[in-house]
Amino acid sequence: MEKKIKIAISGAAETTFCSPNINDTAYLIGKELAQRGIITITGATTGVPYWAAKGAYENNGYVIGFSPAFDENEHKNVYELPTDYHHLIFYTGLGHSGRNLILIRSGDGVIFICGRSGTLNEFLIAYEEKKPMGILVGSGGEEKYMKEIVKEARKEHNKIVWESDITLLIEKLIKII
């Protein structure tokens, strides 16, 4: 049986500061991953990851989420997170930072779309782990700092794709995975 590629989606849970139409963009990324038979994994949250999950789910893709919560009740009522558009949600009980580590380690690669501090946390984990990464250039938020972080870190990582076209981003990321 052929091993399926898993790509984590990292991005802003709150998208008001992202580029225009970012929800549509995230949806199209999820759709394209599904059409390529790639498993989409998310932090089981709102915003960019939610829309990517919806795009994958509605286009016959398989979607796995990793929640910061201990169980479904905490996920819905304390973190106020959705459960739709996922086939399976793992409740880590580790809060956001612990969940982020599991999410990034679970993917064969990561796509970064817009983002805030949580996305930067996931970016730094992926960078340290030398995980194949695709950064959607021009998506807004903390994405604009990622190149500077790589430059200042002075640590070799040759598996990063910087691309503004979602199809090219996915194609290039798959090649390095």
Image (tube, rainbow, N blue to C red):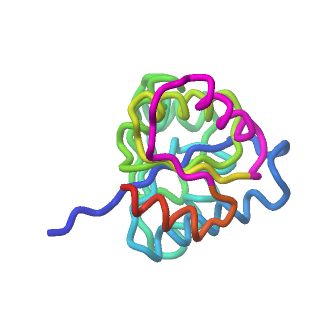
When asked about the image quadrant of residue 144, the answer is top right
Q: Position of residue 123 (x, y in %)?
A: 55, 34
Image quarter hosting the C terminus: bottom left
- Front in this rendered view, residue 161 or 115: 161
Residue 177 is one of the magenta-drawn residues = no
Percent x, y for residue 121?
Answer: 57, 27
Relative to 42, say whether 35 is above or below.
below
Q: Relative to residue 9, is residue 40 depicted above or below?
A: below
| Vertical comparison of 77 with 82: above or below | above
Q: Residue at x 50, y 34 (%)?
A: 73
Q: For the point 63% across and 65% down, which residue is it?
A: 166
- Dividing the image into 4 quarters, which one contains the N terminus? bottom left
Instruction: Count the labels in the image.
Output: 0
Residue at 64% over, 58% down:
163
Where residue 29 sits, quadrant-wise, is: bottom right
In the rendered image, residue 79, in percent from the top left (x then y), is placed at 61, 31
Residue at 43 percent of width and 28 percent of height: 128
Observer-nearest residue: 73 or 63?
63
Which of 138/93 is in front? 138
From this viewpoint, which residue is outermost toward the left?
1
Q: Is residue 58 above or below residue 20?
A: below
The answer to which of 133 and 34 lies nearer the viewer is 133
Residue interval drawn in magenta: 138-162
Image spot of residue 42 (x, y percent):
50, 47
Quick check: is 156 in the magenta stretch? yes
**Is residue 4 shown left or right of residue 28?**
left
